[in-house]
Amino acid sequence: MALNPDFVGRSYPPGAPYLVGREKVREFSEALGVTESVSLDVDAAQSRGYTDVVAPPTFAVRLVMAAAESVALDPDLGLDYSRVVHGDQRFEYSRPIVAGDELLSHVTIDGIRSVAGNDMITTRTDISTTDGEHVVTSYTVLVARGTDSETA
Amino acid sequence: MTGVDVGYEIPSRDFRITRETLIRYAGASGDFNVIHWNERIAHEVGLSDVIAHGMLTMGMAIQVVTDWCEDPSALVDYGCRFTRPVVVPDDGVGATLHVSGTVTAVEDNIATVSLKAMCADVSVLGKAIARVRVG
C-alpha cells in the first residue's frame, strides 16, 4: 500500500518531556560497552565541566523512536509497522545530552517516497530542552518492505 | 587533536556481541523488537537467526571516534545506513564487530571520519561518517 504523500511536512506535537536519568545514561553506556568515564562517573563528568554524566551519541534514539512510532502508527498514513525496518540514521548535534536534561521531541515528516516497491519515510526529530535550547536533530529513514506481489 | 592529517587511521576496536548484549541493549534502549531476542520469530520473518539492533551497531561504531577525541562535545554529526544485519547465534561465541576509522577530510577545524564496521569480513554499516571538531 502506497503511503499518503499529503503527509509530507506534517508535524506532531511533542509528548510529555523526557527526563534524562543518571542511571539510565549509565545503563545505556554499559550496554554499548562505553569506557569513557564522563558517561559512567559523575565526578569525572563534573571535572570536565558537565553537570552530570554525558549520554553516548546515540542515546537520542530513545526519544527518536518514540516520536517515530507516533508517526508510524498514525492510521491515516497507511504504514504497515510490522514491515518497517530502520534504513538510515543521522544525528546533528548542538551539544551532548547530559543527565538531568528535560527534553522535548518535535517530529516532522520530511519525505515520503517509494523505491522498488518499498515505502520509505524520512522523519526529522528536533530535540530541545524544555527551556528551548536545541540539543540534537535526528533524521531517520524507515523502510516498509513491500510484499512480493507489490514488488513484482 | 591538533594537526590531524587526511589518511590518519584512528585506533580500531573489537566489540563482542552475544545474546546477553542484545538483551541488555533492549532494556537500556527500550527497543524490544522480537527479532532481536526471539529465534522463532526471527525465522518466521525469514532471518537466519536473531539479529542485533542496528542502533546497537551504530552506537558501538561511534566509540572509536569518541575514544579518540576524548571530548563528547566535539562531535558535530554522525550518520550511517543499515546495510546488512549482524547475526548473533546462541552458540556461546556470538558475533564480533570490528570497527575502524580513517580521516578523509579536514576543513575549518572539522575532521571527517569514515567508519568501517565489519562482522565476519562483511561490512554491516554503509556511509558511516562522523564529523568532529579538532584543534
Image (tube, rainbow, N blue to C red):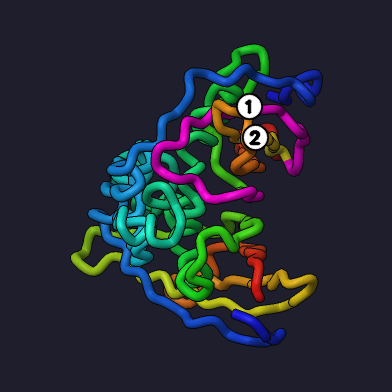
Direction from residue A82 to residue A37 in the image, left or right: left
Q: Which residue is pictured at 59% across the width and 42% down the height?
A: A135
As drawn, A6 above or below A87? above
Q: Per the image, is A96 magenta?
A: yes
Q: Which residue is mark 1?
A: A106
Q: Which residue is pictured at 77% across the width and 34% down the height?
A: A111
Disc 2: which chain?
Answer: A
Q: Which residues are magenta?
A: A91-116
Residue B127: image location, x then y, percent:
66, 63
Q: Quadrant of residue B6?
A: bottom right
Q: Which residue is mark 2?
A: A126
Q: Per the image, is A92 magenta?
A: yes
Q: Is residue B44 visible?
A: no
Q: Nearer the viewer, residue B69 or A140?
A: B69
Disc 1: which chain?
Answer: A
Residue B26: image location, x then y, percent:
33, 43
Q: State whether discs 2 and 1 lie on one chain.
A: yes
